[in-house]
Image (cartoon, rainbow, N blue to C red):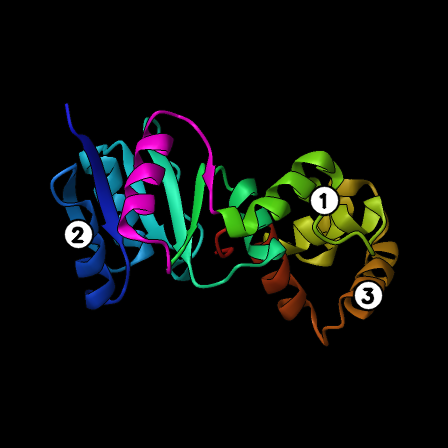
């Protein structure tokens, strides 16, 4: 059976280019323009691969579907973010059609596929698990715990209860976290953390 994909990109010309690159070898079940649409159609159609642009946000996790992300950004932050979210493949938008086809087939088979230009980032991350687990090495373990809870939208008293700390201690920790991250308020820190941890926005 042919490998099947859902293509997700908010630009019509990009979707058309991907469709052309995949034609003849891979069956495109649907083309969508947003992250929520990608999640819905992937859950409905259960393709072998979700091919999604990083600009649409963290890709949805659907059992039985591998994720291949493509992007114009080739830096370690975006690569580590993709790895933390369970992405199997990562390509630059400039990849030629033949490489896109190889990548789709690879991740459909459950094998990782990363663009050669970013292989060093992947190798470094795999050799240093701490860099994957903790994207903010300037923070202590406790501050990291506070930041993760802050990213979910919890207020200081709730964070204090979760961690068994006093509200004053949490307030002080948040203040230090803001300084270390170079942001002016907790909402900006939470946004930064959600992007790093690949969390969806808190309700």
Q: Position of residue 145 (x, y in %)?
A: 75, 46
Q: Is residue 98 magenta?
A: yes
Which mark identifies residue 180?
A: 3
Q: Which residues are magenta?
A: 94-115
Quarter assignment of residue 41: top left
Q: Nearer the viewer, mark 2 or mark 3?
A: 2
Q: Is residue 109 magenta?
A: yes
Q: Is residue 153 visible?
A: no
Left or right: 5 in relation to 142: left
Asked whether 13 or 196 is in front, the reply is 13
Foreground disc of the pair 2, 1:
2
Q: Earlier in the sequence, mark 2 or mark 1?
A: 2
Q: Secondary structure at mark 3?
A: helix
Which of the 4 quarters of the picture holds residue 47?
top left
| Residue that mark 1 sits on | 131
Q: Work out whether mark 1 precedes mark 3 in sequence or the reverse, and give the earlier one.
A: 1
- Whole-Å distance between the Cαs marked 1 and 3? 17 Å
> How many C-alpha atoms fall within 10 Å of the one at disc 1: few (<14), some, or many (≥20)?
some
For marks 1 and 3, give the one nearer the viewer: 1
Alpha carbon of mark 2 to alpha carbon of mark 1: how far?
A: 35 Å
Numbered mark located on residue 19 in the image: 2
Query: Is residue 100 shown left or right of residue 24?
Result: right
126 or 57, which lies in front? Answer: 126
Q: Is residue 120 above or below residue 47?
A: below
Residue occupying image coordinates x 35% and y 28%: 63
Q: Secondary structure at mark 1?
A: helix
Q: In the figure, residue 180 lies in which quadrant?
A: bottom right
Q: Residue at coordinates 55% horizontally, 55% vertically from top-left?
A: 78
């Amino acid at each position: 059976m042919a490998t099947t994909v859902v293509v997700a990109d908010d630009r019509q010309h990009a979707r058309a280019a991907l469709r052309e690159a995949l034609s003849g070898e891979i069956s495109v079940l649907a083309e969508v323009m947003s992250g929520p649409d990608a999640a819905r159609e992937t859950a409905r159609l259960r393709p072998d691969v979700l091919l999604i642009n990083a600009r649409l946000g963290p890709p949805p996790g659907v059992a039985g579907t591998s994720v291949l992300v493509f992007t114009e950004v080739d830096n370690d932050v975006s690569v580590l973010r993709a790895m933390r979210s369970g992405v199997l493949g990562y390509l630059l938008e400039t990849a030629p059609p033949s490489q896109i086809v190889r990548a789709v087939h690879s991740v459909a088979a459950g094998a990782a596929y990363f663009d050669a230009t970013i292989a060093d980032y992947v190798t470094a991350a795999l050799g240093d698990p701490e860099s994957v687990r903790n994207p903010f090495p300037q923070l202590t373990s406790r501050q990291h715990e506070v930041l993760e809870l802050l990213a979910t939208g919890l207020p200081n008293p709730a964070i204090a209860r979760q961690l068994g700390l006093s509200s004053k201690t949490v307030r002080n920790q948040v203040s230090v976290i803001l300084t270390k991250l170079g942001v002016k308020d907790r909402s900006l820190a939470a946004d930064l953390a959600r992007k790093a941890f690949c969390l969806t926005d808190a309700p």
